[in-house]
């Protein structure tokens, strides 16, 4: 079992920055991949970025590439999402999730944190 707790959401003006944190506990290892998903009002949840605990492979959605950076601190068992140049369309609930690298399904989810970008 893996437990995930997000923090760092809030209200920011367009062009601003936020850093989200996801503290993981339980059975984490380099064989897990961590993802940041987001869900805007009325839209489906989408994968914004992901990283392997080993840190060697990252993924970014085209909509966030060049603006968001995913990273991890193994000593703190924490994954971060640095979000710069935020746009109103980045508004939504952001979820941290984890999956085994041998699975396509994210089995573990945090409770989500709200990010609101005002224009």
Image (cartoon, grey):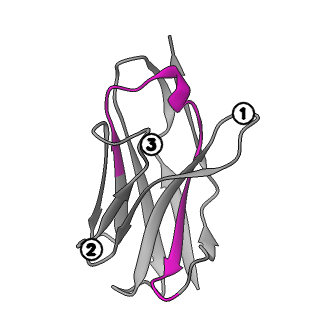
First of labels 2, 1 by sequence position = 1
Residue sitting farthest toward the top: 119
Name the disc covering residue 8, or none.
Answer: 3
- Circle 3 or circle 1, nearest the eye: 1
Q: Residue at x 65, y 50 (%)?
A: 45
Q: Position of residue 2 (x, y in %)?
A: 55, 80
* Residue beneath disc 1: 41
Tag 2–tag 1 contact (CB < 8 Å) = no
Is 37 situated above or below 28? above
The residue at 34%/29% (across/down) is 17
Few, some or many C-alpha atoms within 10 Å of disc 2 (few <14, some 14-19, many ≥20)?
some
Judged left or right of residue 69, residue 31 is right
**Label 1 SS:** loop
Q: Is residue 3 above or below residue 9?
A: below
The structure residue drawn at horizontal position 37% and vertical position 86%, both measured from the top left corner, is 29
The disc, 3 or 1, on the residue closer to the chain's N-terminal end is: 3
Element under label 3? loop
Q: Which residue is mark 2?
A: 74
Region of the chain picked out in magenta, as a range: 81-102
Q: Residue at x 42, y 75 (%)?
A: 33
Between residue 73 and residue 53, name the one nearer to us: 53
């Amino acid at each position: 079992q893996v437990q995930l707790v997000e923090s760092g959401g809030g209200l920011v003006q367009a062009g601003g920055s936020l850093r989200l944190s996801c503290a993981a506990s339980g059975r984490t290892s380099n064989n897990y991949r961590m993802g940041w998903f987001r869900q805007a009002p009325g839209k489906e949840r989408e994968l914004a970025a992901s990283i392997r605990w080993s840190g060697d492979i990252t993924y970014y959605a085209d909509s966030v590439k060049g603006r968001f950076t995913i990273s991890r601190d193994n000593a703190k068992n924490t994954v971060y999402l640095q979000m710069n140049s935020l746009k109103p369309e980045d508004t939504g609930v952001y979820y941290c999730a984890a999956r085994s690298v041998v699975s396509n399904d994210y089995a573990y989810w945090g409770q989500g944190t709200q990010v609101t970008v005002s224009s």
